[in-house]
Image (cartoon, rainbow, N blue to C red):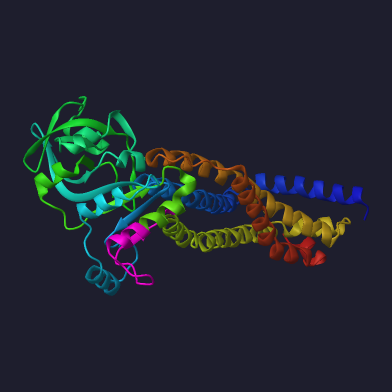
Amino acid sequence: MTRATNLRVYAEAVREAVRSSLANRLRTFLGGLAIAVAVATVAMVIEGLDGFARYSRLTSARAFGADTFLLARVVRGQLSRRELAERLTRNPVIRRSDVRFLEQFADGEVIYAPLAERRADVSAGGRTYENASVGGTAAALFEIRNLGIARGRFISRDEEGRAAQVAVIGADVADALFPGVDPLGKPVRIGGRRFVVAGVQARQGSAGGTSLDKNVWVPLQAFERVFGPPESLQVFARAPSPDQTDRAAGHAMATMRARRQLRPGARENFDLLTPEAARSFVQGIAERVGAAAAPISIMALLAAVIVVTNTTLVSVTQRTREIGVRRALGATRWHVVVEVLAEATVIALVGGAAGLAVAGLALAAAGGPVGIPLPLRPGTALWSLSAAGLSGIVAGVYPARRASRINVIAAIRLE
């Protein structure tokens, strides 16, 4: 057949497929619904996992810092119980004297900020916020981490030096203790001591299942007045410039080794978590979650193929006499195959378009609460719609073969 003839055959097949679909709306609806559910599932899984990865990177940067590294007695991470016990035995605690040593030999290459943390209740007036994360730290933490101060300011160096009882509170703490009231300058009580609110953080979300909006930051020495000296400090650090992070991390490690008087080749008795390690950890979680995307998508599409195959078989059975008459009037087996495939594909594409519309609305609705845009990207939409069309073709293969093998005489006699 010529190209023009082929085009006429395909156009006629599509018209017949649309006519048949409209004539049997319930059957078409069921097949389209299966495809719509499958396509919506595929699109939401793809965009949801991409959003999860972006959200993980964002919250990791908020919790840890984009170019920040961490010195600690032990960075727990994915350590087994045995490894954790071994490191706690081998690694000495980190004291303020260690931090002073690091700062003394920073040589302008590293900015340090110690941190001690404790869970405690925070109260104001007759209200109490339970189990807040109280952190004793230094003014330099504001230079190291993106703390997102929405109102007021962070702890100043003067307040740090004189152990002033000032506090910077997270969004959840502010909302709970001062509903509808500006918290700046208002007193709060931590561990029975009075602190004055100097700043309020913007809403940060969560990281690793832990809310970042329940933080309360106070000067380290003020923290020690309330809770006593911490068992061990963590030390957040960063280079003055992001392109010097590796050099700064190396300088910090060398300084800490000197502080601990470790000989060349000796194993470190402290942990250092670099930005790459933190990002790799987050990326590893995203990849493990993403591994489920393919099986979920394949199962959804397979279920849709089965439903569309069944509905198309029903269509072929109902139209047996019609197909026999058309064959008797000169239609070839190829014409019948193309027509049946076109019907299955039309159902799949219409269902796919409906599924994409539902997925777009669902993603837009889900993106608001988590604070991360979840758009339905054109690439995802095109891929999902292509998968729907391919599913329709696969679903139509068996019914098309069956239709093309119908006995013409027996079909014409069928009432």
Q: Count of labels shown?
A: 0
Locate residue 7, reporting x and y percent. Answer: 86, 48
In screen coordinates, is 138 left or right of 409? Answer: left
Examine the structure image and report whether residue 226 is included in the region drawn in magenta.
no
Locate residue 15, reporting x and y percent. Answer: 76, 45
Quarter of the figure with the C terminus: bottom right
In screen coordinates, is 413 left or right of 209? Answer: right
Locate residue 31, reporting x and y percent. Answer: 59, 53
The residue at the far left in this view is 192
Quadrant of the image occupied by residue 280? bottom left
Q: Residue at x 34, y 54 (%)?
A: 70
In depth, the one of 399 and 291 nearer the eye is: 291
Locate residue 209, reporting x and y percent. Answer: 31, 52
- Residue 395, above or below 15: below
Quarter of the figure with the N terminus: bottom right
In screen coordinates, is 83 left or right of 241? Answer: left
Q: Residue at x 73, y 52 (%)?
A: 342
Quadrant of the image occupied by residue 225? top left
Residue extent of the magenta highlight: 254-275
In depth, the one of 357 and 115 nearer the eye is: 115
In depth, the one of 167 and 402 nearer the eye is: 167
In depth, the one of 341 and 206 nearer the eye is: 206
Residue 317 shows in the view? no
- Residue 90, above or below 288: below
In screen coordinates, is 192 left or right of 110? Answer: left
Residue 169 shows in the view? yes
